[in-house]
Amino acid sequence: MPSISDRLKSLGVQAGADQLKPPILTRNKSVSKHIGGDLRATERGDAYVVEKRYPVSGNDYPAPLWGDGSLEVLAAWAGEVDVAGMDKTDFAFLDTETTGLSGGVGTFAFMVGIAKFEGDEFQLAQFFLREPGEEQGQLAAIEQFLAGAKALVTFNGKSFDVPVLNTRYQLYRWPTPLRDLPHLDLLHLARKLWRARLASRRLGDLEEEILGVSRGAEEVPGYLVPQIYLDYLKTGDAEPLKGVIYHNAMDVLTMSALLTHIADLLSDPVHAAAHDLDLLSIGKLHEDLGQVSEAQALYMECLGRPLEQDTWLEAAKRLSFVFKRQENWDAAIKLWKTSAGKGEIYAHEELAKYYEHKKRELETARKWTQAALDTISTSGFPILIRFQWQPELQKRLLRLDKKINSDLRKV
């Protein structure tokens, strides 16, 4: 009768450790072969780092990595006023590749790409976990690299990248080097600037649509990145990680180029804007910041361009309310009358309010109110907008009729 040992051998189970492959050594050799990089000693252990330097001008990246645009408006929007006076060498650009998108203690950053400007070069360091046990060394090396940085630039980093890294530092009860850095998260600004004309404001889409940059064949989709790393941990084969290295590097380079483009755009929108819709979006940005004169100038610039009607009407509406706040009634009324002629109900209402409360011309106010009701009653007028406006307009009409009749009785 065969022994248990014989039966296990017949199933391919080996006794002892003599024929077991050293998985960590195999992985490390594969990493060195396929993605390059070197070990960097830290007080918390070794960290594996892949470094590359890009000349600020004349590098392989098709868009400028830095320019002469002012950061003042961008800093005001981000609520980080100190950033306005910073030099390019003060910024660190950060992007992570993680084992998942859920966050929490179970998610860790197996690759962290950080770049800084040093002289005439853009220095990119990618901190890679050859195995999860090297995480303390990785985090220590990141802290060393960030020393001297005065501000952080990310894309969706406030919601994801930075919280993930902060969690890892907290896990080891270390103070995180990211907490006190002024932070420019370009995702939220990109949404504000390009929501009107781009269906997607993902970093890769902005790279193509705004910067005119296309990625090479090495690129791997972001959603595949976690699985590629998990496969590497199982098989020890680091060759597929070349695409992840490329993906992460391009994300970091794109952030610097996007920051440069936005700074140039906000510094001189009339000449730098590639699309008229961008002018309107920048005007809204200035208006949100309370920079009314800048917003007014951009809205007026929009109205002087051959815009599509919807865009022109939105610029006219925003400009009319700027004039209203300034009590520049002649300019506001001119825009309202033009917009009312194009079916804008708000313009009818504003004219009715002006003639009722400012001019005390009740019949004229009634005329504009009735014109609005006639407009929303036409066939083909959007039903939801009709339901939105009809009760208020009818209420206004009844009130005006009462006022007019009261005045007639007095006569």
Image (cartoon, helix red, strand yellow):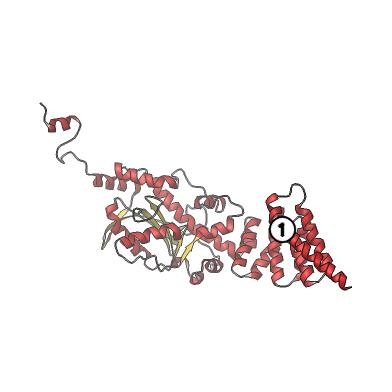
Number of other residues with Cα within 10 Å of mark 1, as a class: few under 14, some 14 to 19, many 20 or more: few
Up-down relation of residue 222 to residue 298 (above or below): above
Q: Position of residue 182 (x, y in %)?
A: 45, 68
In the image, 189: left or right of 298?
Answer: left
Q: Is residue 211 visible?
A: yes
In the image, 125: left or right of 325?
Answer: left
The one of 112 and 403 positioned closer to us in this rendering: 403
Quadrant (top left/top right/bottom left/bottom right) for the C terminus: bottom right
Q: Answer with the quarter of the image where residue 50 lies.
A: bottom left
The one of 258 and 370 positioned closer to us in this rendering: 370
- Residue type (three-letter) at the residue carrying disc 1: Pro
Q: Is residue 123 visible?
A: no
What's the residue at 60%, 64% (across, down)? Answer: 285
Q: Position of residue 247 (x, y in %)?
A: 43, 49
What's the residue at 35%, 65% (across, down)? Answer: 176
Determine which residue is flagged by label 1: 391
Quadrant (top left/top right/bottom left/bottom right) for the N terminus: top left
Outermost residue, right side: 411
Q: Answer with the quarter of the image where residue 233 lies.
A: top left
Q: Position of residue 48 (x, y in %)?
A: 31, 54
Q: Answer with the quarter of the image where residue 180 lies.
A: bottom left
Q: SS class of the residue under badge 1?
A: helix
The one of 88 and 408 positioned closer to us in this rendering: 408
Q: Position of residue 304 (x, y in %)?
A: 73, 60
